[in-house]
Every structure is written in structure tokens, then in C-alpha cells.
């Protein structure tokens, strides 16, 4: 299928061939009929991509702050690779469309294949021929509403949420500053609710359009016409509300709002304009400044948007989805007219040219629609819409040692191509001799296409069966979200593949048992979990310097994990497990490797009110390892520090930048500071590839992988019971 994408580094726009997205549970696969270009938000993004690196930095100071923090935590080289990798990737455009349901995922019962729906979301309602859309980001289209008009659903919801924030009442007067697409819709919605509207925009054509659609008077904000209209309509008191729907760097909109708003009026910011509030003016009138966040309640909440958990209507009357349905109803009943807003309807094949004309100013438009080659007719879907099949994973069994032809490359497939895969794994594998990147599989088509372009995969697909059924693939890398690791690993083992799965191996004991059952059923134990720290060069060298132990050891591991950004999928504990369940295996494995044994007991404590943990592991010889996993520490402090004490010796590791060993009066310090923190990914991958090539043992014994996973899972049981848990009971 085709999708509109942009490279944020170069500014390149392209209509790219990408794999068809899979139809996951909790959503529907939608074939697009019409998608709407947001001539404000999207053109701003397109313009930013054409800036110099300095210009991009100035336009996004929030991202610059994240880069600075990453440099402090991970070093310049790793941060540079991460940032350049993100910049030099294709990103999608679009967030408002109408289309036909082509396939229904598990758990969906409110629509069926062939139904017409309006869809929202900058990750799900893209300018693409097919999109997977979760339940709370689509709504059925009323029978009387044309698909081209239903494509306005998302931008209409943005305007509707802004009007709700203004709490307008019948008979009031409002000022709408900025009469682009959102401003025009705001003006119509206010008029439909009995509010008299004055509009302000420097474009005479937009002013004339707003008046034609119901505004009382409109004019240039720099002219006296707007002020005169407000004075006449309000007897000189000023408007009840001001809606800021303008963009750009001028502070004129907020100054105009202060001048024309009545005492204790409301100012609602919907667009992205400069907000240097003149203090005296806003203070003297005690103006109520409000922000309108996108489509409505539920926006940026992954439990609502992705997991489909609705808010009770008794507590949240107007959610994203209910706003979307409400706007479509208003258009269907003729209370809002979107047809006059459509400046141009372009064929989807001409998407790049259309964007370029908009960017260059050659095409001046309020709203532009893309019409898709296989779009549905106005009265329903086409009869020959193809159906995407659900992959069926074949079973199989073979001996644990693969049979490979001599001197052939090791053929690797990736399931998942997110940030960790593309920044920490694939760069090492792409330049390794004797390795062939065969196939990349993702549920999001563009991710697969990006990975194929950047790392040279032979194929990109969304069909998992294409990998598991391919006899030429030697090993499968599972680099997806945590909740899918165990099942994908189980399927790959049954298909006879060697498997490299990023931590965690499993989130529950049942999932771990399922993986082991697959090993037993298939006779295939070719499994490696991404516990890379034991392979780190500094830690390897320090371990050799420390030498063998004769007595029990005490190990302390401080992990300054820090807080996660709001909206991170790591916070979705209901589906993805706790942060420690997802990441803790790294630290358990490192401790067990240094102590030369698997843990036999687990005790855990957690302060109330945050995610900090104290985990104490017991080992057969009496050694202990204490892992302090904290999220409340200083951001500038190193992430990982470790001390190992035994037999009069001390080993120290300082965040994979320096290691040292104290033995009596002697002290050894790592001979050089590495240019970047090497946490062992390259060495681990090399060991895995060698094992696949030779058919020899995996880098870490399966017994150890299982013990580490069981210990990590036992933390939850220890917290619940308030007492140590033996791993024999936890398994």
C-alpha cells in the first residue's frame, strides 16, 4: 500500500510503498476513502522539516532539553546515534479521515466489515490507503453523511472541544481570532449554539467565508472594524469569550483578546500561537485563560486511546470519541457546513505535489482532501475490497543444533523495529560480516519500511507467518512490546528458529511455562534473552581482575531509573507489566553472573507513592545482592553504579564509563574511559551469531535465563506477601 511520509532531517516528502498494517485486537482495519490535510498543524510540521538543524532546535526547545539530558546519561555518541536515527527516519502525516472497515479485530462488536467510519489520531488516521484504528478513535458515520464530509471529523472535534472549554451560553458574543480551518469550524459551532460571532483574520477571503457561514462581522485584526463590531454588539462591554485559533510567532492575538474581552471573560487557546500575556491587561480584567487539548478527554491517555477503556459518561460527558460522533451528527443535520471549506480535492497519487504547492504558497486553501484510488462510492463500499488475512503460525520441531550449509550467511529476521532495535541492535548487525538481514516484521507498516531502507533488510512485511514459515531464516529477533515477548518467542521456537528476545522473556509464570513447554514440544532450546550487561567490556575486564571468590559476597546495584515521560507505554502496567518486571532482569542477570550462581530467594520492599524498589536476592553460598531500583533520584546522577565486596576485595562499576578493583593496597582502574557507554550489546550479538552459525551452545544457558526471569517475577509475589519468596515456590 502507499502512505505519505516525510523525512524530518532532510524535509523530503514521499508517497512510499509500505506493508499493509495488521489488524490487532481492540481495533479495526480501515481502507481510506478521504483524508483531510490540516493546513495548520501539518504544514507547520512540513515547514519545520525544511529548517536547518539550528532552526529545528529553536522551534522545539522541549526536544533539545531531552537531548541534553540524554547526553548526560548516555554520552554524546549514543545520543547522537539516537537523535540522528529519529531524524533520519520517515514519519507519517495526517490525523483525520473517513473510510470503510475492511477487517474487525477481536473484541470489536460495534462495527462490521463494510461499515463507514470516521477516524482520528496522528498515529492511526494517517494519509495511507489502510490504517489500523483502535476502538476509541473511530465512530460510525451517520447514513446521510457523505464520506468527504465525514473526513472532517477530527478537526471538527478539535474545534468542538475548544467551544466546550469556552462554556458559551445562548445570546453571548464571542471573538474568533484566526479564520483558518479550525477557526471557521469554531465560528460555525458557536453560531449553531446561539452565540453571535465576530471574526478576526488578515485574509479578506477567509473573513468573507466566515460571514457567509454565519459570523456577524469579520475583519483584519489591525483594522478598527473588528473593535467597532465588538463595541456595537456588546454595548461597549467586550466579548464574553475569545477563541485563539491562530498560529505563528506574533503576540497580537493575546493582546487583541485582552483589549476586546469583557471583565472576567474567558480566553481559550486552541491553536499554537505566542502567549506572552500582558500582565496588567489580564490582571485588571481578571481574565480566565484556558487551554483546549486536542480532541477532548482521553487524548494522550494510552489506556483510553490504545486499550479502549472508556470513561463513564456520568463522569466525563464528552470524550474524544463522543466529540467525534457529536460533530458528525451536527454536520449530518446541517448545523455545520463543511463543503464551502473544501478548497481542493486532490488525488492521493498527487499527495507530494499537493503538499509542495501548499508549502510554497502556490495553493492557498482552507481545507484540502485526498481522494483515494480505491475509495468507496458515496453510497457504500466497493464490492471487491481485499481482505487482509490473519497470520496462522505453523508448528514444527527439530533438533536444537541447526543444519546450515557451509559458508552461507546467518540469515536474521526482526519482529519489531522500534527505537531500541534501530539504535542498539541493528547498527551492530548491519555492518557484521557473514550476517544477512532477511525480513523485518512490524504491525505498523511505516516502521518496517524505515528499517528496510536504513538497514538493508531484503523484505519488509506485517505478516509474521512470512518469517516463521521461511526455511531460509536462521534466527528471529523479538523486539516488540513486553506483553508480546513470550507468545512470539513460543511461536518462533515451535517454528524451529533460534530466538533472540529482548528482555523480559515473560511477564507471568504462566507465560514462562508456555515458553518452556514450547522448548519441550519442539526440542528447540536455541534461545537468548537480551541480558547484555554481562557482556560489557569494562565489566568483563573488572571481573577477571577481581578473580575467583572463596567466601560469600555482598553486591549492591543502584539503578537510578528516573521518571518516565507522560504517555510512555512503559506506564501501561495493566498490559505491559511493572517497570521492574520489564527491566529488572538486566540487573538480576548481571548480579547472578558476577556471583556465579542463580538466586534461590527474593525479598522486596517498596515505599508507598512511587515505583522505587529494594530487592534482595539470596544465593546458595550465602551471598546477597541488593538492587535499589529508584525513580526519584536526580536526573544528572549516573544511571547504574555497582559494588561487589568479597574476600577483602572490592569491584566497582561507574555507569559503564569506569571500572576499578581494590585488592588490599593494590588498585586497578580501567585503563581508558570509553568514548561511549558500552553495555555489551555488540559483544552479546556477536556471541549469538557465532552460536547460530556453529550450532554450538547459546551464550547464556537456558537454565540461567529461566532463573533470572523467575527471580524478576518473584518480586511481585514478595511485595504482596511481605516476606521472602523462594524461587522453587515462585516457579
Image (spheres, helix red, strand yellow):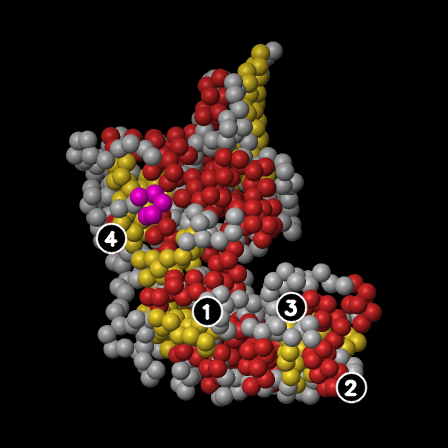
Using a 10 Å C-alpha cutoff, classify the residue at mark 2 as few (fewer than 14 neighbours), some (14 to 19) or many (20 or more). Answer: few
Left/right of residue 238 with respect to residue 75 in the rendered view? right
Q: Which residue is mark 4?
A: 466
Specify the quadrant of the image occupied by residue 729.
Answer: top left
Instruction: Name the N-terminal-most of marks 4 and 3.
Output: 3
Q: Secondary structure at mark 2?
A: loop
Identify the residue at image location x=26%, y=72%.
Answer: 385
Specify the quadrant of the image occupied by residue 75.
Answer: top right
Q: Which residue is mark 2?
A: 235
Instruction: Name the N-terminal-most of marks 4 and 1.
Output: 1
Q: Secondary structure at mark 4?
A: helix
Count of numbered tags = 4
Identify the residue at image location x=55%, y=73%.
Answer: 180
Q: Which residue is mark 1?
A: 363
Specify the quadrant of the image occupied by residue 205.
Answer: bottom right
Q: Name the mark nearer the viewer: 4 or 2.
A: 2
Q: Which residue is mark 3?
A: 269
Q: CA distance from mark 4 to mark 2?
A: 71 Å
* 451 shown above or below 703: below
CB atoms at circles 4 and 1 under 8 Å apart? Answer: no
- In reply to whether residue 60 is colored magenta, the answer given is no
Q: Name the mark nearer the viewer: 2 or 3.
A: 2
Q: Position of residue 424 (x, y in %)?
A: 43, 39
Q: Name the mark nearer the viewer: 4 or 3.
A: 3
Q: Tell me the magenta residue range.
A: 452-456
Using a 10 Å C-alpha cutoff, classify the residue at mark 4 as few (fewer than 14 neighbours), some (14 to 19) or many (20 or more). Answer: some
Q: CA distance from mark 1 to mark 2?
A: 40 Å
CB atoms at circles 4 and 3 under 8 Å apart? Answer: no
Instruction: Name the N-terminal-most of marks 2 and 3.
Output: 2
Task: Determine the residue located farthest toward the left in the rendered image.
Answer: 405
Q: CA distance from mark 4 to mark 1?
A: 44 Å
Q: Position of residue 341 (x, y in %)?
A: 49, 78
Amino acid at each position: 500500500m502507499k502512505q505519505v511520509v516525510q523525512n524530518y532531517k532532510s524535509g523530503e516528502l514521499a508517497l512510499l510503498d509500505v506493508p499493509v498494517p495488521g489488524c490487532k485486537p481492540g481495533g479495526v482495519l480501515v481502507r481510506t476513502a478521504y483524508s483531510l490535510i490540516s493546513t495548520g498543524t501539518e504544514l507547520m510540521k512540513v515547514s519545520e522539516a525544511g529548517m536547518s538543524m539550528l532552526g529545528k532546535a529553536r522551534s522545539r526547545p522541549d526536544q533539545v532539553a531531552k537531548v541534553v539530558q540524554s547526553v548526560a546519561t548516555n554520552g554524546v555518541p549514543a545520543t547522537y546515534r539516537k537523535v540522528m536515527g529519529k531524524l533520519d527516519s520517515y514519519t507519517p502525516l495526517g490525523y483525520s479521515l473517513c473510510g470503510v472497515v475492511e477487517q474487525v479485530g477481536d473484541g470489536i462488536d460495534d462495527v462490521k466489515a463494510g461499515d463507514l467510519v470516521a477516524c482520528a489520531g496522528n498515529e492511526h488516521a494517517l494519509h495511507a490507503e489502510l490504517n489500523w484504528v483502535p476502538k476509541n478513535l473511530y465512530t460510525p458515520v451517520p447514513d446521510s453523511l457523505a464520506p468527504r464530509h465525514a473526513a472532517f471529523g477530527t478537526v471538527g472535534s478539535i474545534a468542538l472541544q475548544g467551544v466546550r472549554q469556552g462554556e458559551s451560553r445562548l445570546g453571548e458574543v464571542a471573538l474568533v481570532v484566526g479564520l483558518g480551518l479550525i477557526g471557521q469550524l469554531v465560528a460555525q459551532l458557536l453560531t449553531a449554539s446561539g452565540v453571535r460571532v465576530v471574526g478576526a483574520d488578515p485574509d479578506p477571503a477567509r473573513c468573507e467565508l466566515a460571514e457567509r457561514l454565519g459570523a456577524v462581522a469579520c475583519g483584519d485584526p489591525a483594522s478598527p472594524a473588528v473593535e467597532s463590531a465588538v463595541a456595537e454588539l456588546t454595548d461597549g462591554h467586550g466579548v464574553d469569550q475569545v477563541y485563539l485559533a491562530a498560529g505563528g510567532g506574533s503576540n497580537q492575538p493575546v493582546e487583541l483578546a485582552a483589549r476586546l474581552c469583557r471583565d472576567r471573560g474567558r480566553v481559550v487557546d486552541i491553536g499554537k500561537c505566542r502567549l506572552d500575556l500582558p500582565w496588567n491587561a489580564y490582571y485588571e480584567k481578571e481574565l480566565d485563560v484556558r487551554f483546549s487539548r486536542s480532541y477532548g478527554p482521553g487524548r494522550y491517555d494510552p489506556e483510553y486511546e490504545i486499550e479502549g477503556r472508556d470513561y463513564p459518561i456520568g463522569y466525563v460527558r464528552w470524550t474524544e470519541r463522543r466529540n467525534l460522533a457529536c460533530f458528525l451528527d451536527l454536520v449530518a443535520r446541517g448545523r455545520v457546513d463543511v463543503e464551502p471549506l473544501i478548497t481542493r480535492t486532490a488525488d492521493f497519487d498527487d499527495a507530494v505535489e499537493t503538499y509542495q504547492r501548499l508549502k510554497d504558497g502556490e495553493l492557498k486553501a482552507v481545507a484540502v482532501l485526498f481522494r483515494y484510488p480505491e475509495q468507496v462510492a458515496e453510497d457504500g463500499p466497493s464490492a471487491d475490497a481485499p481482505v487482509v488475512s490473519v497470520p496462522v503460525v505453523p508448528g514444527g520441531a527439530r533438533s536444537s543444533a541447526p543444519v546450515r550449509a557451509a559458508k552461507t550467511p546467518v540469515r536474521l529476521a526482526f519482529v519489531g523495529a522500534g527505537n531500541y532495535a534501530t539504535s542498539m541492535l541493528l547498527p551492530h548487525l548491519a555492518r557484521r560480516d557473514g550476517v544477512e538481514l532477511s525480513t523485518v516484521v512490524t504491525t505498523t507498516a511505516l516502521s518496517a519500511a524505515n528499517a528496510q531502507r536504513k538497514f538493508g533488510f531484503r523484505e519488509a512485511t506485517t505478516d509474521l507467518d512470512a518469517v516463521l514459515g521461511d526455511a531460509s531464516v536462521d534466527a528471529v529477533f523479538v523486539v516488540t512490546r513486553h506483553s508480546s515477548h513470550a507468545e512470539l518467542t513460543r511461536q518462533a521456537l515451535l517454528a524451529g528458529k533460534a530466538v533472540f528476545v529482548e528482555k523480559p522473556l515473560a511477564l507471568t509464570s504462566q507465560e514462562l511455562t508456555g515458553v518452556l513447554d514450547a522448548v519441550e514440544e519442539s526440542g528447540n532450546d536455541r534461545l537468548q534473552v537480551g541480558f547484555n550487561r554481562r557482556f560489557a567490556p569494562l565489566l568483563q575486564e573488572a571481573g577477571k581482575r577481581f578473580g575467583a571468590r572463596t567466601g560469600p559476597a555482598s553486591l549492591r546495584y543502584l539503578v537510578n531509573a528516573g521518571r518516565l515521560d507522560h504517555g510512555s507505554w512503559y506506564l501501561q502496567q495493566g498490559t505491559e507489566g511493572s517497570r521492574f518486571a520489564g527491566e529488572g532482569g538486566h540487573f538480576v542477570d548481571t548480579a547472578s553472573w558476577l556471583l556465579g550462581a542463580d538466586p534461590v530467594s527474593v525479598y522486596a520492599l517498596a515505599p508507598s507513592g512511587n515505583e522505587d524498589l529494594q530487592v534482595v536476592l539470596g544465593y546458595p553460598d550465602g551471598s546477597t545482592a541488593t538492587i535499589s531500583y529508584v525513580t526519584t533520584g536526580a536526573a544528572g546522577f549516573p544511571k547504574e553504579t555497582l559494588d561487589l565486596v568479597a574476600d577483602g576485595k572490592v569491584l566497582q562499576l561507574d555507569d559503564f564509563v569506569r571500572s576499578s578493583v581494590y585488592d588490599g593496597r593494590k588498585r586497578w582502574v580501567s585503563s581508558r574511559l570509553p568514548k561511549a557507554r558500552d553495555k555489551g550489546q555488540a559483544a552479546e550479538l556477536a556471541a549469538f551469531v557465532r552460536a547460530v552459525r556453529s550450532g554450538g551452545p547459546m551464550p547464556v544457558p537456558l537454565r540461567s535465563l529461566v532463573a533470572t526471569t523467575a527471580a524478576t517475577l518473584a518480586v511481585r509475589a514478595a511485595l504482596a506477601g511481605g516476606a521472602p519468596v523462594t524461587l522453587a515456590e515462585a516457579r
